[in-house]
Amino acid sequence: MVGSSSKRLLASLAILAASVAAELGPNSRAWAAAEPNAAASAGGLTTVDADGAFRVNGRRFFPIGLTMPPPLEGMTPWGTTAVDELVDGGVTIFRTGPHGREWSDELLASAVAWNEAAAERGVFTWVHLRELASALPGTEGEARLREVVETLKDSPGLGFWKGADEPWPRFEPADLEHAYGIVKELDPNHLFHTIFGPFSRDGTIFRQAPDPPDLRPYNAVTDTHGIDVYPIHYRFMGLRPPSLHFVGLWLAALRRATGRNAVTMTLQICFTGSKNPEGPEFVLPTRRQERYMIYDAIVNGARGLIFYGGQLARCHDERDAALGWNWTFWDSVLEDLLAEIRAGSPLHRALLRPETTVSLRTSTEKIEAISRRVSPRERWVIAAHHGKVVRKVTLRDLPRWAKSGRLHPSGKTVTAKAGKVTLYVPAWGVRVMRFTRP
């Protein structure tokens, strides 16, 4: 991780890099960081394939998003352009459109500007339709919806539409059918992606394992799904440890409830429950907590990750408040973690191969583990531990040729024998390993 002081010293190098990128072309930054099958092209068709992987112009794509991003013209505390900082750090999706207010001419102009900025950097926007997602025939809402879609649909930076937020149980599928039909009629080239909140038939959320209702009727009014789960609450601090594994449990429940694999997980930076309702104090995920939640989501089938709440003033210190975004969390936690999974990282290639996933047997139910094959000579293993104490664990079902591997990202050696590897995993810890065939 590069600290704030180091970033200030490197700001001049960023300016030099930007001038080189300008000579190479407007999309050179994103393309240079990505493998050929994972790179994002700033424009064209977004689809999902039979394995539940997102695609851009036919190429597989593991979106890493922010909702909401900093101001478009914002700066970092160390003097770099905010959007460039985030793109360089691995962010490929920026949610735009209204947040806490309805669509207006001003917001539409902002969405156009965001699309242009995204296209220049080889990344994408995810436009929140908000109240327009439930527009009814013949209403002002329908007219505004048509205007928004017609204005943005051919923008090179547009990647996805966002439907009604957490529609169940506020909206029945029939309430969303008309607006979804309009969007797909006017713009068949971009996916419609809807985020659900935690759900349970008896109304409980963080008290027990998910008991999902049947969400398949919503498949008719969205192309792909996501879910947001924020287990770290200020009011529970000191009373009980946060149930971080609800991230994986709820994501798996969403896949069962919808019957679809094209799902994303929205993880917390900050949300309403992060702040002390009676004072200025707030709580953010630690690095270990955020890392566990990232990999718990991946182990349970996430085809993309979104991070929520960087814009919320309730979790800003004085410096972040002045800049309109949580650069403290970015600098101390998120940037370092995205470096492990972003396009250009060794692991990213495995994230693009969900069809190769194998669930591994483990010596304890507190560890969930999968392997993924990048090629016949390369296998990745991810193990996530939702226990409260350090454990010695054995993972089984590795290929027999796997002998010596490397931990990611540290590079430390691990040894496997006869299809098994044994190692220690700390509480809420993750072990990511890469085995290559001699």
Image (cartoon, grey):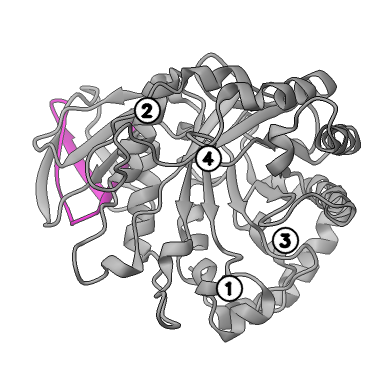
Which residue is identified by label 3?
Answer: 84
For label 3, the crowd category at 10 Å Cα-Cα, with few meaning under 14, some 14 to 19 and many 20 or more, is some
Residue under the point 26% across and 58% down: 242
Mark 4 belongs to which amino acid? Glu
Q: Under tag 3, what secondary structure?
A: helix
Residue 48 is drawn in which quadrant? top right
For label 1, the crowd category at 10 Å Cα-Cα, with few meaning under 14, some 14 to 19 and many 20 or more, is some
Q: Nearer the viewer, residue 423 or 303?
A: 303
Q: CA distance from mark 3 to mark 1?
A: 22 Å
Q: State which mark lies toward you, 4 or 1.
A: 4
In the image, is 275 to the left or to the right of 217? left
Which residue is identified by label 2?
Answer: 372
> Eyeballing the image, is 98 above or below 375?
below
Question: Which mark sits nearer the N-terminus, 4 or 1?
Answer: 4
Q: Are marks 3 and 2 in contact (CB under 8 Å)?
A: no
Specify the principal SS of the magenta part. strand
Can residue 140 be seen from the camera position used here? yes
Q: Which residues are magenta?
A: 413-438
Q: CA distance from mark 4 to mark 1?
A: 22 Å
Q: Under tag 2, what secondary structure?
A: strand
Residue under the point 34% across and 69% down: 234
Q: CA distance from mark 2 to mark 4?
A: 31 Å
Which residue is identified by label 4?
Answer: 166
Mark 1 belongs to which amino acid? Ala
The mark found on residue 313 in the picture is 1
Q: Are marks 3 and 4 in contact (CB under 8 Å)?
A: no
Residue 372 is drawn in which quadrant? top left
Q: State which mark lies toward you, 3 or 2.
A: 3
